[in-house]
Amino acid sequence: MNIMSATNKATADQKAIGWDGRTLVEMITESERLFADTGRYWGIEDLSIKDKDPIKYEKIWSRLRGGLVGARETALNISASPIVREIGELCFGLYTPEGDSISLSTGIMAHIHTMSEALKHIVRADYESNPGIEDGDIFVNNDPQLGDVHNADVQEFVPIFWEGELIAWAAGVTHEIDVGAPQPCGMPVGTVNRYEDGFILSCEKVGSSDRLHRDYEHRSESATRMPFYWVLDEKCRIAGCHMIRNTVLRLIQEEGIDTYKTFIREVIEDTRHAFVNRIKEMLVPGVYRSPSFMDVPHAGDKGVMPDYAAVDSLMNCPLELSIDEHGSFDIDIDGANKWGYHSFNCTPSGIQGGLWVTLCQTLIPNDKVNDGAYLATTFNTPYGTWSNPDNLSVSNTLSWMFLIPCFTGLVHSLNRGFCGRGYLEEIIAAYPFTGNITQGGGINHHGHDGSWSNFEHSCSGVSARWAWDGETSCAAVWNPEGDMGDVEAWEIIEPALYLGRNIRPNSGGFGKFRGGSAFESVRMVYGTDRQLLYHARDGHVHQCSGIFGGYPGSTGYRHTIKNTDMKERIEKRLPYPVQDVDSENSQISANINADETFDRRLYHYPDPHGEYDLYLSQICGGHGLGDVLERRAEMVAEDINTGHLLERYAGSHGVVGSRVEDGDWTVDATATDTLRDEKRQQRLAQSQSVEEWMDSQRDRAASLDYNVPVRKMHRESCELSEKWLNNYRSFWNLGDDWQPPTA
Ligand code: MN
């Protein structure tokens, strides 16, 4: 026997690491067969521990969940990155040997199933044989095509063994400041394919014996602009995973391996049951439709982006939720349009990220959360669309940008169900988009080639609820414990000083109850003449809407001033602008005689800035609920007096009042009643029936007489989806032969 054959023999004889002598591939195959045959996880019929000893069952759950939350709270202090330390942009989870989620910590719960997808890739691709899975190994992944949302979210996996068997995976994820793309920052805008997405690790083995491999350390030290944060975040994730491993091993020492093995499968089946029961309890069977849209305005980037990518386009998500009387929960986005040469494409795994972070906070905020709930749902992401591209080289750096509005649509659908069932206190007018994402890079104020991704947008306004206004600057859909972070923490790594942070009036959507306001930041580039800056948020299109007649939160605008006189103002101790607040009366425009950009193109190729340039970032406010003419007039006055509404918009609410000297703005009740009566009469006079309106628009609909991006979107959807084409034909009554015009 030659030496190579001897090596191969040894591998073949190696004991499988699955349970009872099986390989992991055999385990996942059997698990999937049993679920397909029985409809139950591992075919489990009886919840043996829960039924016999419910206290013990809950105790084991609480210890595992507590271990995960404890790992997160401790490990985040190891990170130096303000995104992780200040904002808490991390999360830990525990998974079965086959990669099914058992339990999850608090934090960015989006990753409950994305990490499951990555682990299932490790199992299905038979990493057990090559490169091998051993006690003390460390795997890392940030490839959205294998299991992630975007490559800024880096995931770590540590296998947990007991007497030679793999009994679980500990997993952790953090969001990185820089991903080593040609454009600096963690979530570049203007990337046109995957080869511009930067550092991508496709479920790689990067450590053994609880230590990172030196070759991987060297590679990550040179692959991104901020290696210090990358490496410390990696240590944070590994430390958390090792704490989780200790929790699991201690639990097994006390409860026994058989109890543990039974528990982890039972709790997933129990959660599947609980999810189905929750659907039956909270929602009404039927088909719910909630579309959303996003503008991708790259036509203004001609010359810096390739011609085929420098175009304006519109993305659509025709989200349809179907629920039957048995508690099924099936989502379909058939009709979504084509992927594009931009940063906002998604993968089926990323879609699951958006789904679970939404459901954790709406439908199942109090229940156990794991892949049992995933098994109770289906999600169709049609091939060839932005949600499941038929081209593996598309860019994914900013998948979240359209995922957020898509799942806001889902919240609208859930609201209608809650309303139908009478659970009015559960209703929230969807989540706002979370932006503006301020990012940048170049030579920084420390003289290094650095980059940054500011995360103060995790403190958006929250939308209105059934009988309450939304909270001001509070949270983001993807991080329910949102925080804006201290300005000093951001200024350590960002060469842009904060001149002011203010509540942004009119940012929350109007309504009987208004969306929570957000804030704005005015920044000044400092200590460098070479900074690229980006915006990222809605500009031309309301991506989401209010509910029951409430208006959406405001869209954003760019307001950037270059070549300012700030240097002179600072030297001469003259007043300088600290706020924009009101676009018609902005300190930024009023005081600075310089080059001003004022437009709605919020997604754009990075824009070069120099020292003393001013940059405005407006965070998104929440959406409104109910008719604005039903808002109590005193609440409108309070909004004006507390800076949530500009005085000249009182009339939009049908409210009349005045300011007493330098004091408060007060309501004129009689004049308000009269104005509101007039406005209601006006509405009646201007209204037309839906039938009349549709008749008047049918010719436009038939000829796709829309602007270029909208026409292109319709054509793509018709081409990709028979269902969508038929819906369009029947909705507009165009006949069965109608085809979208080609010209
Ligand atoms: Mn992320």
Image (cartoon, grey):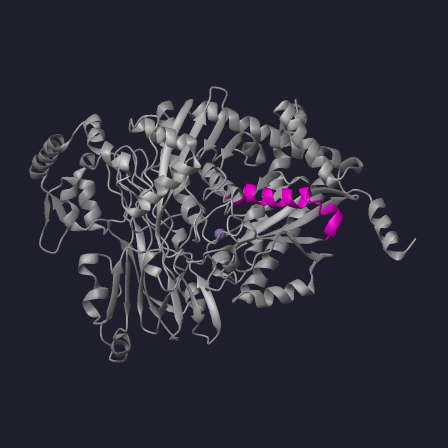
Magenta stretch, overall SS: helix
Q: Position of residue 510 (x, y in %)?
A: 24, 42
**In the rendered image, which quarter is residue 248 located in?**
top right
Is residue 116 in the magenta section? yes
Q: Position of residue 292 (x, y in %)?
A: 36, 40
Count of numbered marks: 0
Residue nearer the viewer, 737 or 603: 737
Q: Quadrant of the C terminus?
A: top left
- The image shows residue 667, relative to residue 735, as above or below, that is below
Drawn side of residue 396 relative to residue 370, left or right: left
In the image, what residue occupies the spot 46% across and 64% down? Answer: 184
Residue nearer the viewer, 531 or 391: 391
Please provide the residue range marked out in magenta.
110-136
Q: Position of residue 495 (x, y in %)?
A: 40, 70
- The image shows residue 73, relative to residue 280, as above or below, that is below
In the image, what residue occupies the spot 31% across and 33% down? Answer: 466
Q: Position of residue 191 (x, y in %)?
A: 45, 58
Is residue 455 in the magenta section? no
Drawn side of residue 598 relative to residue 4, left or right: left
In the image, what residue occupies the spot 42% across and 30% down? Answer: 723
Q: Does residue 366 appear anywhere in the picture?
A: yes
In the image, what residue occupies the spot 35% across and 39% down? Answer: 714
Residue nearer the viewer, 582 or 538: 538
Residue, far right: 1
- The image shows residue 363, relative to residue 444, as above or below, that is above
Q: Does residue 92 appear anywhere in the picture?
A: no
